[in-house]
């Protein structure tokens, strides 16, 4: 296997971080690369990629491990439950990254999980440092820490310029989720 993996960060307040990671996954699948996405926050809600990803199996694997968005909308779970699920997601990530089975591993919303204190920053930094050189690691989520940015090879910040929510338009199926 090639030794050309990268650490890629999609961060910022604008939309499109997970979408960019999924676009990269789709491109990689076109070259017969195996891809795994582990979702740290979104786990309890249904959104399109949960269903569409099944069509891409076995080359694309999606593990929605999080307990759902933390502290917003209908979240009534104690923070300890969110931390436990994030710890499980991190353990799965370690296994997938070191397995030798995947060319790309996407840690969706990991930056947000670190920011919320669900995943210790040092655990994420160690995961990045321990990454086999053949594996590209993609980290999504707002609030990417400076230490993560420093270790990354590519960092893209999504910046919101205009958002339909500000005009009272709710999230759209197939566009936002």
Image (cartoon, rainbow, N blue to C red):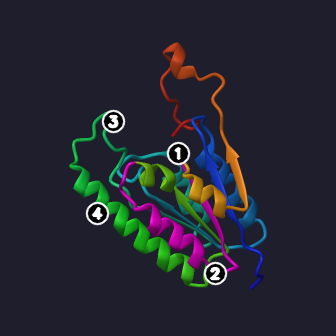
- Secondary structure beneath dot 4 equals helix
- What residue is disc 4 on? 84
- What residue is disc 3 on? 72
Cα–Cα span, label 2 and label 1: 25 Å
Q: Which one is earlier in the sequence, the residue at label 1 or at label 4?
A: 4
Please provide percent x and percent y for residue 17.
61, 46
Q: Which one is earlier in the sequence, the residue at label 2 or at label 4?
A: 4
135 above or below 164? below
Q: Which one is earlier in the sequence, the residue at label 3 or at label 2?
A: 3
115 above or below 90? above
- What residue is disc 2 on? 132
- What residue is disc 1 on? 143
Cα–Cα span, label 1 and label 4: 21 Å
Question: Residue sitting at 25 percent across and 51 percent down?
Answer: 79
Q: Specify whether 31 is left or right of 109.
A: right
Please provide percent x and percent y for residue 158.
66, 39
Foreground pick, 97 / 23: 97
Q: Which one is earlier in the sequence, the residue at label 2 or at label 1?
A: 2
Foreground pick, 59 / 103: 103
Q: Residues within 10 Å of mark 3 (few under 14, many from 20)?
A: few
Q: Quadrant of residue 26?
A: bottom right
Foreground pick, 109 / 176: 109
């Amino acid at each position: 296997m090639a030794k050309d993996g990268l650490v890629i960060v999609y961060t910022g307040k604008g939309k499109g971080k997970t979408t960019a990671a999924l676009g990269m996954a789709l491109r990689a699948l076109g070259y017969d690369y195996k891809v795994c996405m582990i979702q740290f926050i979104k786990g309890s809600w249904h959104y399109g990629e949960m269903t569409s990803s099944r069509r891409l199996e076995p080359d694309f694997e999606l593990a929605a491990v999080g307990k759902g968005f933390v502290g917003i909308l209908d979240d009534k779970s104690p923070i300890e439950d969110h931390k436990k699920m994030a710890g499980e997601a991190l353990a799965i990530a370690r296994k997938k990254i070191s397995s030798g089975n995947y060319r790309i591993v996407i840690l969706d919303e990991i930056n947000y999980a670190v920011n919320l204190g669900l995943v210790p920053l040092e655990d994420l930094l160690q995961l990045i440092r321990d990454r086999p050189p053949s594996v590209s690691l993609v980290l999504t989520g707002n609030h990417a820490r400076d230490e993560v940015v420093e270790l990354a090879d590519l960092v893209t910040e999504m910046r919101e310029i205009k958002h339909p929510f500000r005009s009272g338009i709710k999230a759209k199926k197939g566009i936002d989720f």
